[in-house]
Amino acid sequence: LLLAACSQSPQARQIDEIRDTADRQADQIEKQADERAEPLDTQAKQLREQARQAGGYDGKRLEVQAESLEKQAELIRDQAEEQAEAVKAAANARVQAIEASN
């Protein structure tokens, strides 16, 4: 592996670095989103349990709150996924430009 890395052209090393950096950035974006979304999921779970115990209109209101929190968590993750894909797409565009210049 080390020998293969040493025998790579500067262009190939640059392309590998661009892709590796994009992958790391995308992973970090998704990790941060999960860290933001997980507390919302936890709150929603707790509210659902309270709703089950409360019943009636109080329970229905708690259910609505739980659904809202779950939707927020979903949107946070969806946004992060889109951002991660954009980072990777930008890296792919840079790679294609480098490859086309040769």
Image (tube, helix red, strand yellow):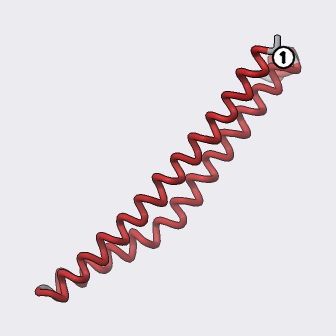
The residue to which callout 1 is attached is 8
- Label 1: state its secondary structure: loop
Q: Determine the image quadrant of residue 33.
A: bottom right
Q: Find the residue positioned furthest to the top.
A: 102
Residue 8 coordinates in the image, percent (x, y): 84, 16
Image-based side of 96 in relation to 60, left or right: right
The residue positioned 86% from the left and 14% from the top of the image is 7
Residue 3 coordinates in the image, percent (x, y): 84, 18
Quadrant of the frame with the N terminus: top right
Front-lying residue, 32 or 102: 102
Front-lying residue, 71 or 9: 71
Q: Residues within 10 Å of mark 1 (few under 14, many from 20)?
A: few
Residue 74 coordinates in the image, percent (x, y): 40, 59
Residue 16 coordinates in the image, percent (x, y): 75, 27
Position above or below: 13 against 7: below
Q: Find the residue positioned furthest to the left.
A: 56
The residue positioned 29% from the left and 70% from the top of the image is 67
Position above or below: 92 against 33: above
